[in-house]
């Protein structure tokens, strides 16, 4: 069970990081995520969360496949 969670978490981080890197490499705004600090009243965050959603779906699928294969 712990190994399945670790595999899913690792796959989430790898897939999300890879997609964000591809977004910055090819200047794809729908894959970029960045923070913009503004005045002392607060901050403004900009960017897309599509890379994180795709990473979440991939981590669920990879975690289930790992669990079926090695359980």
Image: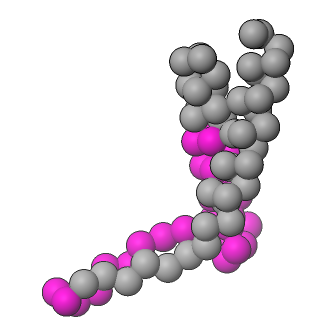
Q: Nearer the viewer, residue 71 or 51?
A: 71
Residue 2 coordinates in the image, percent (x, y): 54, 18
Residue 62 coordinates in the image, percent (x, y): 76, 32
Q: Please identify the quadrant where the N terminus is shown.
A: top right
Q: Nearer the viewer, residue 14 or 23?
A: 14
- On the question of residue 31 being in view, the answer is yes
Give the left or right position of residue 30, taking residue 17 as reference.
right
Task: Indicate yes or no whether the magenta region holds residue 59.
Answer: no
Residue 12 coordinates in the image, percent (x, y): 63, 42
- The quadrant in which residue 42 appears is bottom left
Q: Which residues are magenta?
A: 12-41
Residue in the picture at 77% in, 10% down: 70
Residue in the picture at 75% in, 43% down: 58
- The quadrant in which residue 29 appears is bottom right
Residue in the picture at 38% in, 83% down: 44
Residue 50 coordinates in the image, percent (x, y): 68, 66
């Amino acid at each position: 069970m712990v190994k399945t969670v670790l595999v899913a978490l690792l796959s989430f981080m790898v897939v999300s990081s890879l997609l964000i890197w591809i977004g910055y490499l090819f200047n794809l705004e729908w894959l970029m995520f960045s923070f913009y600090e503004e005045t002392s009243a607060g901050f403004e965050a900009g960017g897309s969360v599509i890379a994180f959603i795709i990473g979440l779906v991939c981590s669920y699928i990879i975690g289930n496949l790992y669990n079926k294969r090695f359980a």
